[in-house]
Image (tube, rainbow, N blue to C red):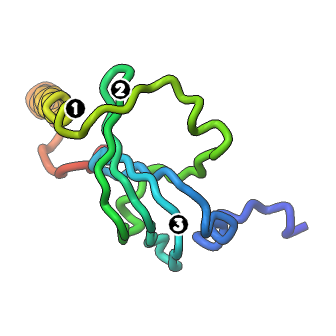
Amino acid sequence: MDSLIPFTTSGSLVDCVDRKMLVVLRDGRKLQGVLRSYDQFANLVLEDTVERIYHQDVFAELWRGLFLIRGENVVLLGEIDLDQEDEVPLRQVEWSVLEPYHKQEIANKKHREDLKSQVLYEQKGFCKEGGEGDGY
C-alpha cells in the first residue's frame, strides 16, 4: 500500500540527473542546463547552464557555465524535451539587444508590486515585510 504514495522528496530527482532541465528561480531568472547533482535540500548543480530572457516572440541566452542553486530559491524544475526543443516558435537574438527590454519589464513589475503593497498596507492593514522574490 505504501508504494502508492507519490515520491515527493528530493530523492524523486534521481531520474532527472544527466538530463537537460529548466529551472525558474524566485527572482524570476530562467536557467537551462544539465542537472549533474542534488542533495537532500534540493540544492542543484547545473552544468553547461545558460540564462534565458524572453520578450514577445524572441529570446536571448547568456552563458553561465557551472551553476549551483540553493534549493529554497527554486520555484519550478522541469525536464526539457529535446525532441520538441527546436520546434518552439521563438527567434533567438543577441543578449545585448533584448536586455534593455528585460530590465524595463523587471522595473515595471517592481513598480506594480510596490503599488500593490502600498494599497494593501494603507487599506487592508497588511505589513510591508518581505523582500525580493518573497511572492512565492
Residue drawn at x 31%, y 56% is: 63
Q: Is residue 123 above or below residue 49?
A: above
Residue type for callout 1:
Leu
Callout 1 environment at 10 Å: few (<14), some (14 to 19), or many (20+)?
A: some
Residue 45: quadrant of the picture: bottom left
From this viewpoint, is residue 9 visible? no
Identify which amino acid the numbered label 3 is placed on. Leu
Residue assigned mark 3: 35
Q: Is residue 33 left or right of residue 83?
A: left
Residue 58: image tag: 2
Q: Position of residue 35 (x, y in %)?
A: 53, 66
Rate crowding at label 3 as few (under 14), some (14 to 19) or many (20 or more) other CA atoms within 10 Å.
many
Relative to 121, 14 lies left or right = right
Label at residue 98: 1
The reply to whether the C-beta atoms of the residues labelled 3 and 2 are less than 8 Å apart is: no
Residue at image x 37%, y 70%? 66
Position in image of residue 47 (x %, y %): 44, 68
Q: Secondary structure at mark 2?
A: strand
Q: Are marks 2 and 1 in contact (CB under 8 Å)?
A: yes
Q: CA distance from mark 1 to mark 3?
A: 27 Å
Report x, y in % for residue 37: 52, 76
Kindly identify the amino acid type of the residue bearing the numbered disc 2.
Val
Of the image marks 3 and 2, the number of the one nearer the N terminus: 3
